[in-house]
Amino acid sequence: MKEGYSLSRSRRVYPRFKVDSFGFLKREGVVLPILIRDISSQGAGVISKMSLERGALVEVSGDLSLFNFYLSTQGRVVYCLRETENLFRMGIDFGFRKIVLAR
């Protein structure tokens, strides 16, 4: 595990909610299907078949029916780790675009 990843995990102050919802990640006109694993008001953990470099600006969207909420926001990739041969786990930071998770 990379040092920056473990440091960011230990500094979490916003609660994360497991959602396991399908969504999309868009970067430079390319749209990728993703699985949104968890979400907080500051970011999301997603699974993708494609890796992206740290710092990449992306758009994330998906129907989070558990929260009766449609997510559509921009963020930056803060980490990308290989889960399996064909799957990557990414952390997306929404930065100043704080998301309010409310019904």
Image (cartoon, grey):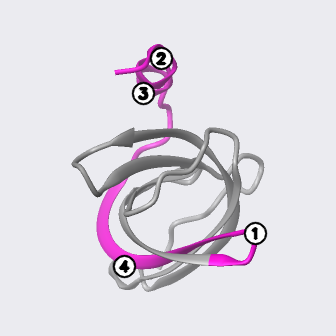
The label nearer to you, 1 versus 3, is 1
- The nearer-to-camera label among 1 and 2 is 1
Residue at which label 3 appears:
9
Q: Are marks 3 and 2 in contact (CB under 8 Å)?
A: yes
The Cα–Cα distance between marks 4 and 2, rounded to whole angstroms, is 28 Å
- What residue is drawn where x is 56% and y is 50%? 52
Residues 90 and 74: in front is 90
Left or right of 100 on screen, residue 21: left
35 and 82: which is toward the camera: 82
Q: Which mark is residue 22?
A: 4
The residue sitting at 30% across, 56% down in the picture is 87
Q: Secondary structure at mark 4?
A: strand
Q: Earlier in the sequence, mark 4 or mark 1?
A: 4
Residue at 45 percent of width and 60 percent of height? 50
Give the Cα distance between marks 1 and 3: 28 Å
For residue 54, what is the image quadrant?
A: top right
- Where residue 3 appears, as percent x and y from the top left, is 46, 14
Q: In the rendered structure, which segment of residues is drawn in magenta?
A: 1-30
Residue 7: give its label.
Answer: 2
Q: CA distance from mark 4 to mark 1?
A: 20 Å
* Residue 57, position as x, y percentages in the image: 73, 54
Dot 4 or dot 2: first in sequence order is: 2
Mark positioned earlier in the residue sequence (1 or 3): 3
Dot 3 falls on a residue whose secondary structure is: helix
Does residue 77 lie above or below 99 as drawn?
A: above
Does 5 appear in magenta? yes
- Tell me if residue 50 comes above or below residue 32 in the rendering: above
Q: Amino acid at mark 1?
A: Glu
Q: Give the residue pinned by disc 1.
A: 28
